[in-house]
Image: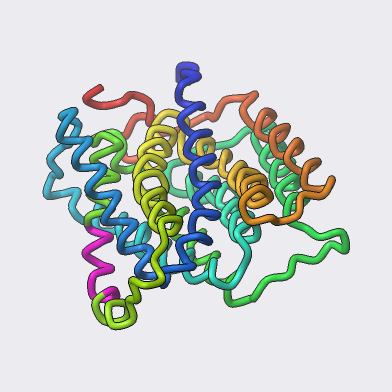
Amino acid sequence: MGKPKSGVYVAVILAMVFWGFSFVAFKFAIQSFRPITIVFFRLLVSIVFLFSFALAFKRLNKIKRKDQKWFLLLALVEPFFYFLGEAYGLTMVTATVGAVIISTIPLIVPFAAYYLFKEKLTPMNYLGLFISFGGVLLVVLTRSGGLAADWKGILLMFVAVLSAVSYTMVVKILANDYTPITITAYQSSYGLLMFIPLFLIFEVPKLDFSLVTGQSLLAVTYLGVFGSGICFILITIGIRELGAARANIFGNLIPVVTAIVSFFLLKEAMPFMKILGIFIVILGLLLSQISSLRVKPRWGREAVRHIPNA
């Protein structure tokens, strides 16, 4: 396997930064909209953005009939189950606590990637991963060592975590045959179709447009364009170029970004322990990337490296 290009790392890091902002954006959106309404409009915005971009630059692939089942499964785990867990979970926990739970994804992905694709992490990869997660804990723990949050909210956030792990595995299957924007566009489209019944039954009767503000509209637009559009394109590139486990290690950046943005926009506290945690997260990420993944392809598929139709 050749050495990954630095641009791939930039792409993955940008995805995590944008996702870090999305937890704060949700807190602004929830002031005017109910959770499923946020998800519905978020997906609608992302679909318009993605298909417009893909058609303009001729980056949209036609889906093969044999792969339809994978796209349906992709949409079922993310956005459907993922956004249900995240959207309702974030109504019960703070943005930072939600982000740290999501950051456990890199701890689970390597086991799934090893079982399905025989990806192996080196000891240095594991060391960096656990050091990084230790930094994440410092970012969110209180001085007394407690982590105050509703257990129902925590459970819902872990539904999102398991959905994201499943999403990563399915993307790895599709990534060699389709452009990242194709995967993301159809994923969002199928996901929107799954949310329409819930939106019509539970949300439309309770819509109150008098509560809508410019701030909440901007937040939903951000969630659609970045959180459900650009982020998924960038992480798909990362999964293809770095492998599922290695790309997801960067997920530990999400709570760091969320903690910083929450400090400025939501006025959450930023004590010394959080600042120390941020530096430890970065140190762990650097250590995790020192040694390369050894990937043994399965199903005759090559390691996810090249960008099709580039």
Protein image colouring? rainbow
Q: Position of residue 165 (x, y in %)?
A: 47, 53
Q: Position of residue 12 (x, y in %)?
A: 48, 34
Compared to 148, does 306 lie above or below? above
Query: Dividing the image into 4 quarters, which one contains the C terminus?
Result: top left
Q: Is residue 199 left or right of residue 275?
A: left
Q: Residue placed at 58% from the left, 46% from the top?
A: 254
Rendering quarter of residue 266: bottom right
Q: Residue placed at 74% from the left, 45% from the top?
A: 135
Q: Residue placed at 20% from the left, 35% from the top?
A: 54
Q: Does 198 appear in magenta? A: yes
Rendering quarter of residue 200: bottom left
Tally the marks: 0
Q: Residue placed at 22% from the left, 47% from the top?
A: 48
Could you say which is closer to the camera, residue 130 or residue 117?
Answer: 130
Q: Position of residue 267 (x, y in %)?
A: 69, 55
Q: Main secondary structure of the magenta part?
A: helix
Could you say which is closer to the camera, residue 67 or residue 255?
Answer: 255
Compared to 237, does 103 lie above or below? below
Q: Does 70 appear in magenta? A: no
Compared to 298, does 44 lie above or below? below
| Residue found at the very far right of the displayed protein | 144
Q: Is residue 85 left or right of residue 154?
A: left
Compared to 247, does 201 lie above or below? below
Could you say which is closer to the camera, residue 54 or residue 121?
Answer: 54
Q: Is residue 21 left or right of residue 223?
A: right
**Magenta stretch, residue numbers:** 190-199
Query: Dividing the image into 4 quarters, which one contains the N terminus?
Result: top left
Q: Position of residue 292 (x, y in %)?
A: 57, 25
